[in-house]
Image (tube, rainbow, N blue to C red):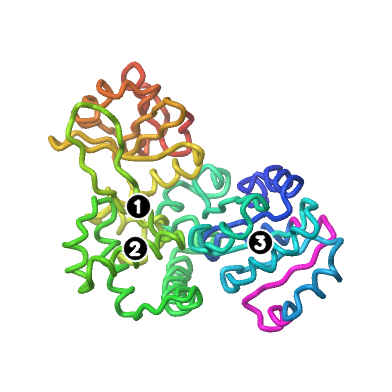
């Protein structure tokens, strides 16, 4: 389990607890939040409550008495999205005693979905996002091809064989639709969310045409946008925004949509083995989403976007921070050749670096300032 400690940047968590009364670890279900928390709790006086457990939830029926009893310990509340109304109680308790490191909160929904945390605990809470594994975190344990096929969820990528991994992901998808979404308070018919998720798997990597997608899903455009927001806020999909660059070119302004975990994508597409993945028409789009998710996760302080002009010039990803830009093109080829449009945008944007990310064995410089590498070798 050493990978968990490395990926979490344990020092970052300890630092957050040393300066903030409450720290929230947010991320998709089954991404390792509880494991991280339990490892940390072993080293400090603490108490852990799983809010999915009725007995643990009942312990908070008189929260003031519970807090008084464990005032000198770190209190960990897991699956906090199940009790969103509890944040006002936490705020009151923290305001009585602003010592750092009082609460560790774990949630399977984003801070925007758990709105009470943003509203009630502003200035009292630090956030840490925990994603499934990315390639660099498992470089010594698994191959990039296995991680691409199976995705980054620990139980999936570390399964004993492809069949067990695939079965785990099918169970995850079913549980997410049947239990997780209703537990968040959303009443979405299972056949509707199932149909939409399958559609999104086939739309992976495309710019969104809301009217076309809504018609295919047999729902209204406002309903589609609501459901996409739910999937986004529960870390299942990523809407990648178009760049706002001033390039004197007409830019496509619709976002692109990706399923964030490649393993979940492949389960929805019924791709169980690597050979089947390579022969599938969706392989290129899958690789693109896989690479983009790895880069955005690693460089989470950079603003991600994509550029596509009306004449077809495109870069799959641009990272921007403090005026510095880096461009990325994803190619599923051992001998990748960037598109002409990629070169056009390099000339127009003048990035600090440009990258072609492909399943190559060794990194190399294709032209001055244009680097080719596998995801595990990328360093901007």
Identify the residue at image location x=76%, y=79%.
Answer: 62
**Residue marked by disc 3:** 105
> What is the x, y in percent for residue 182?
46, 78
- Are the residues at dot 1 and dot 2 in contact (C-beta closer than 8 Å)? yes
Q: Position of residue 87 (x, y in %)?
A: 64, 66
Quadrant including the N terminus:
bottom right
Question: For numbered disc 3, what is the local secondary structure?
Answer: strand
- Disc 1 versus disc 2: distance between alpha carbons? 9 Å
Residue designated by label 2: 228
Q: Earlier in the sequence, mark 2 or mark 3?
A: 3
Please tell me which residue is depicted at 43% across the width and 79% down the height of the picture: 178
Q: Position of residue 370 (x, y in %)?
A: 34, 23
Specify few, some or many for label 3: CA neighbours under 10 Å numbering under 14, 14-19, or 20 or more: many
Residue count near mark 2 (Cα–Cα under 10 Å), binned few <14, some 14–19, many ≥20? many
Sequence-earlier tag: 1 or 3: 3
Q: Which mark is residue 239?
A: 1
**What residue is rendered at 28% in x and 33% in y?**
335
**Would residue 335 appear left or right of 148 to someone viewing this image?**
left
3D distance between C-alphas at marks 2 and 3: 25 Å
Q: Position of residue 373 (x, y in %)?
A: 40, 32
Span highlighted in magenta in the image: 40-58
Binning the other alpha carbons within 10 Å of mark 1 as few (below 14), some (14 to 19) or many (20 upward) gives some
Residue 61 part of the magenta-drawn span: no
Q: Is residue 364 left or right of residue 127?
A: left
* Residue that extends furthest to the left in the rendered view of this protein: 311
């Amino acid at each position: 389990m050493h990978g968990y400690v490395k990926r979490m940047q344990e020092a970052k968590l300890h630092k957050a607890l040393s300066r903030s009364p409450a720290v929230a670890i947010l991320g998709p279900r089954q991404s390792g939040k509880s494991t991280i928390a339990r490892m940390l709790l072993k080293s400090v006086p603490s108490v852990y409550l799983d809010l999915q457990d009725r007995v643990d939830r009942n312990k908070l029926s008189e929260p003031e008495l519970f807090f008084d009893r464990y005032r000198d310990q770190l209190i960990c509340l897991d699956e906090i999205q199940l009790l969103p109304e509890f944040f006002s109680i936490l705020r009151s308790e923290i305001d009585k005693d602003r010592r750092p490191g009082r609460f560790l909160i774990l949630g399977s929904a984003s801070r925007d979905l758990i709105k009470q945390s943003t509203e009630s605990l502003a200035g009292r809470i630090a956030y840490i996002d925990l994603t499934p594994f990315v390639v660099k975190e498992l470089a010594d344990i698994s191959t990039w091809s296995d991680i691409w096929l199976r995705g980054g969820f620990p139980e999936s990528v570390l399964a004993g064989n492809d069949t067990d991994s695939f079965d785990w992901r099918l169970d995850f998808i079913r549980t997410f639709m049947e239990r997780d979404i209703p537990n968040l308070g959303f009443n979405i018919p299972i056949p509707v969310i199932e149909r939409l998720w399958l559609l999104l798997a086939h739309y992976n990597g495309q710019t969104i045409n809301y009217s076309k997608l809504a018609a295919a899903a047999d729902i209204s455009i406002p309903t589609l946008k609501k459901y996409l927001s739910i999937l986004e806020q529960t870390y299942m999909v990523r809407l990648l925004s178009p760049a706002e660059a001033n390039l004197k070119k007409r830019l496509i302004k619709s976002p692109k949509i990706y399923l964030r975990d490649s393993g979940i994508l492949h389960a929805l597409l019924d791709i169980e083995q690597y050979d089947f993945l390579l022969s599938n028409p969706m392989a290129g789009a899958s690789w693109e989403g896989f690479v983009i998710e790895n880069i955005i996760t690693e460089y989470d302080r950079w603003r991600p976007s994509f550029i596509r002009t009306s004449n077809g010039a495109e870069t799959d990803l641009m990272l921007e921070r403090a005026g510095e830009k880096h461009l990325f093109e994803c190619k599923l080829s051992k001998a990748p050749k960037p598109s002409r449009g990629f070169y056009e945008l390099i000339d127009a944007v003048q990035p600090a670096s440009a990258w072609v990310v492909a399943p190559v064995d060794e990194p190399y410089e294709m032209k001055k300032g244009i680097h080719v590498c596998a995801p595990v070798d990328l360093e901007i």
